[in-house]
Image (tube, grey):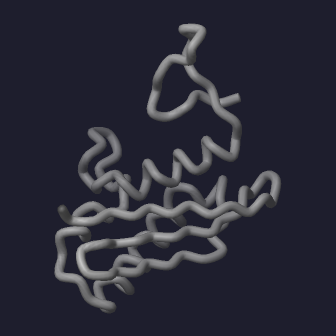
């Protein structure tokens, strides 16, 4: 068992734990939702996804973001996940990222969707 993210306590008052599948999803979301420069000792950790929510919406922006996200995953999570498919779509004020990935240790395939919009 791994510690759950974000760190919190379970109903028994102990530090909450989670299974490997949930931990991998948490790691992926942490990477994608962290802005470069946000971590003190890892200034290049992150993807820049949150800044792109406010960028002009276009197919070119979505393609550039897709390459950026793939590079971030390859740099930081290549030892634990294998990306099968990464799709970035933008519609009006909503940015949607869908990542299909496999756990490198078990081969189990999962999908994570992150969707953000400008209010």
Q: Residue at x 25, y 70 (%)?
A: 52
In the rendered view, tell whether residue 43 sits above or below residue 119: above
Looking at the image, residue 74 lies above or below residue 38: below
Q: How many marks?
A: 0
Q: Quadrant of residue 99?
A: bottom right
Instruction: Indicate the position of residue 115 as horizontal and vertical percent values.
Output: 39, 64
In the image, residue 64 above or below residue 107: below
Residue 33 is left or right of residue 29, and the answer is: left
Q: Residue at horizontal 51%, vertical 54%?
A: 28
Look at 43% across and 48% down and name the residue there: 30
Q: Quadrant of the C terminus?
A: bottom left
Say whether residue 109 is left or right of residue 90: right
Taking the view exactly as shown, the residue that stands out farthest to the right is 106
The location of residue 64, given as percent across then percent down, is 35, 83
- Determine the image quadrant of residue 112: bottom right
Q: Residue at x 49, y 72 (%)?
A: 70
Which residue, as the protein is rendered here, is positioned at the far top?
13
Depth check: give the residue in front, 106 or 113. Answer: 113
- List x then y, in percent, for residue 68: 39, 73
Q: Is residue 29 above or below residue 14?
A: below
Q: Position of residue 23 (x, y in %)?
A: 61, 41
Image quarter hosting the N terminus: top right
């Amino acid at each position: 068992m791994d510690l759950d993210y974000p760190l919190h306590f379970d109903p028994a008052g102990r530090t909450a734990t989670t299974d490997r599948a949930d931990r991998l999803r948490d790691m992926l979301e942490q990477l994608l939702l962290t802005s470069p420069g946000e971590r003190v000792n890892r200034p290049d950790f992150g993807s820049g996804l949150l800044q792109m929510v406010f960028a002009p919406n276009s197919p070119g922006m979505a393609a550039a973001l897709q390459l950026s996200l793939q590079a971030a995953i390859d740099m930081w999570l290549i030892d634990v996940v294998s990306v099968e498919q990464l799709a970035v779509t933008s519609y009006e004020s909503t940015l949607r990222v869908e990542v299909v990935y496999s756990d490198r240790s078990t081969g189990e395939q999962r999908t994570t969707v992150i969707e953000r919009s400008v209010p």
